[in-house]
Image (spheres, rainbow, N blue to C red):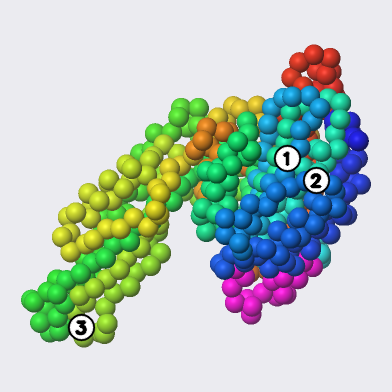
Amino acid sequence: MTRATRDHILNRIDAVADEAIAFLREFARTDTSNPPGDTRAGAALIADLLRRKGAAFETIAPQADMPNLVSSFAFARPGRHLVLNGHIDVFPPGPRELWARDPLSGDLEGGRVHGRGTVDMKCGTTALIFAYLLLREMEGDIAGKVTLTVVSDEETGGRWGSGYLLEHHADRVLGDVLLNAEPSSPWTVRFGEKAPAWFRFRIRTPGAHSAYAHLSRSATRIAARLMLDLERLEDLVPTPPEPVRALLSVPATERAIERAMGRGAVGSLNRVTVNFGLIAGGVKINLLPGECTLEADIRMPVGTTSAEIAAEVRRIAAVYPEVAVEEMIGTPVDPTCSDPGHEMVGLLCDAAASLQGERPAPIVTLGGTDCRFWRQRGVPAFVFGPSPDSMGVPNESVSVDEFLLVLRTHTLAASRYLATPSGPAGAGRGAAR
Ligand SMILES: [Zn+2]
């Protein structure tokens, strides 16, 4: 057993570091590309580790090839319920020739583990699994319950993964707070996220020969005008909760946002962005197009809603009788946001600052994570993970130092959250700082 104090926890992490790195490499060598989304081999690897460590778990697989694993551990004294969430599936590697080494190499070279999905999010998932195993060993100043959820289907919407668990097993996986280790960078802790709204516009006109331009309107010209009109969505002014607005406009926070997500990220974070990811129309140069399809990925900031955006999109498209609008996400998703003043934000920032000498800034993130499923049900959810630099691109690799930082930060923050809130153990909480 391990006493839940900072020194004991860090010593234990040092003792298991090699094993955790070896597991991460093995995980990276296991193909869990999504699509197709078959994660059975990855889940089997994790199940084997849990079994070897004596951690009972349940496999919940509403789709046979997309299993989810759930394991819980209750400490001797009752208390709060902390849930950890990571995903098994990863982006597909894409063309092999763009990679300098096998996307499934799991090579450890230059202080980095190489392979598809190492950043998003095999590093974070492995860190949470080992944090869970370490928490189970703890005794003394710790109470409550911790649940590990390792899921599939994250990259394709979460319907059969976290979404399914919360819909059908909420009593087991909802908890009081959620920790997730998706890429965030060591300089940010993420308490909210933008949300996508996807629309398909089908434009149909009679069409004609190019020379007979008087006979039909052009579907591609209508698409071009529609695109300009839809771009005006970027001028909408979001109304985030005041503490969030104030926090995100602090200069130090803006610097952390751009350091983590690239120059210009502040501009993308606080406004609606519109991307026309696909446009397809016309048959031949000398035919006036009678058909054009346009797909728009609209990213909504905190302080907007999917209903508001959808209404605006339909109002814009209604100007063109030739345009039919279709929402491509079955159940619209709103941006989600937890309280940036929540105790867990402070615990994550304290832990990371104590380890790296620099305090992360609490921010909202651009991309989506499974945290939204918990936030939608009122449970605060927070992300601390590795740098997103090579996420989803060829030659993806994660720094071993960052992997260990993520493992240490989550384990320290989790142990302090679960420390008894009052009584003689209070001294122990201080010691765990
Ligand atoms: Zn991810």
Of 96 and 82, the residue lying toward us: 82
Q: Position of residue 24 (x, y in %)?
A: 78, 58
Alpha carbon separation for disc pair 3 and 1: 63 Å
Residue that numbered label 3 is attached to: 287
Mark seen at residue 55 = 2
Q: Element under label 1? A: strand
Magenta span of residues: 92-107
Please give left or right for residue 220 compared with residue 65 in the image: left
Q: Is residue 106 magenta?
A: yes
Residue that numbered label 1 is attached to: 72
Q: Is residue 205 above or below residue 199?
A: below
Q: Residues within 10 Å of mark 3 (few under 14, many from 20)?
A: some
Whichever of labels 2 and 3 marks the residue nearer the N terminus, that label is: 2
Q: Element under label 2? A: loop
Please give left or right for residue 377 compared with residue 231 in the image: right
Q: Position of residue 185 (x, y in %)?
A: 66, 48
Residue positioned 74% across, 28% down in the render: 144
CB under 8 Å between discs 2 and 3? no
Q: Amino acid under label 3?
A: Leu
Alpha carbon separation for disc pair 1 and 2: 8 Å
Q: Residues within 10 Å of mark 2 (few under 14, many from 20)?
A: some
